[in-house]
Image: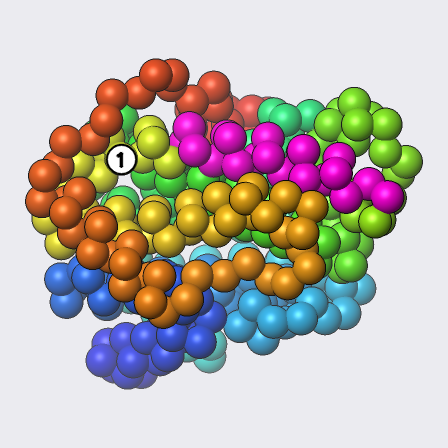
Amino acid sequence: MTRPELVEASRLAIKQGSKSFSAASRLFDRTTRERVWMLYAWCRRCDDLTDAQDMGGELGDQSDIAAQVEHLRSLTAKALAGEETGDIAFDAFGQVASEVGLTMEDAEAVIAGFQLDAEDWRPRSEADLMRYCWHVAGAVGVMMALVMGVKREDVDTLDRACDLGLAFQLANIARDVVEDDAAGRCYLPAIWLVEEDIEPGQHTKPHHRQELADMTARLVRRMEVHAASSRIGAARLPFRCRWAILSAARIYTAIGREVLAKGTAAWDHRVYTSKAQKIGHALAALVEALVNRPPKLDDEPRWRRSDLAENAASA
């Protein structure tokens, strides 16, 4: 397919797969926006293949997940070699990788997260949880930063980009904890469950709803720390990129804050941001991007990209 065809297919993928990120992506300049779409299309397709779902919908049959992970790893390597894969999302990834220098090592950091799901992995500690978040979202944040022109030598800005991915994933876990449990998955650390005196597999039951709200509050507090850290990196980006990233940050952190605000009722209905709220977040991000004075941090995040990536490599 030609580049314009790959871009259009990727635009449709993000429009259907993530209304929040689709809205924020419109704020990028054209070239960056197209590259972001192509990277997103690959991420969405990898997720769908391993979860046997369509555009993030209901989880399907997980019995063949290990084979699917090897399949997407093979397609990714083929795309990076400049070969046609027969899958538009992977061809799009090959296109954007050729333009900005993404590598198999970059992709493998993300694929390793899908590998954990294939192994029916569960986090025992908070460190395990954050390692998973690094793979499935922090590493994506780093690739997004590279797409936006951040140099690999700019380690601190890439660290801040990772922080935003971590914040996004913590918000997602807080929102989706009941849906994940229905699919046989749990991303809450086992140590947290023990501390709350919750029986195995019972954390989403009605009689533990307060304990669940307490644990997701811990996720949201950590989300806030990483989101605040990411603003330091966003301040170094070109204006259009800065505006888009700050918009996405506001939209996603609003989800986590809504889960926190709803307390034990957070999972009665899926938490989301309306179109009007997205517009409001984009306008607030515009002001923030124009002023461009990120607040000073009270505390740096406990979990940093270098530690998470190193721990992942040794695991």
Image label count = 1
Measuring 67% from the left and 71% from the top, which residue is drawn there?
A: 58
Position in image of residue 259 (x %, y %): 56, 47
Q: Foreground: 209 or 99?
A: 209
Chain part drawn in magenta:
207-226
Q: Residue at x 44, y 76 (%)?
A: 16
Front-most of 245 and 66?
A: 245
Q: Magenta part mainly helix, strand or loop?
A: helix
Q: Quadrant of the N terminus?
A: bottom left
Could you tell whether 204 is left or right of 272 in the image?
A: right
Q: Position of residue 255 (x, y in %)?
A: 48, 51
Q: Quadrant of residue 292?
A: top left
SS at circle 1: helix
Q: Nearer the viewer, residue 281 or 84?
A: 281
Whole-percent x, y for residue 285 in the image: 22, 49
Q: Is residue 89 above or below residue 133?
A: below
Asked if residue 214 is among those painted magenta in the image, a careful observer would answer yes
Whether residue 136 is visible to the viewer of this picture, yes or no, is: no
Residue carrying label 1: 231
Quadrant of the drawing holding the C terminus: top right
Q: Is residue 179 left or right of residue 284?
A: right
Q: Extreme top residue here?
A: 299
The residue sitting at 20% across, 31% down in the picture is: 294
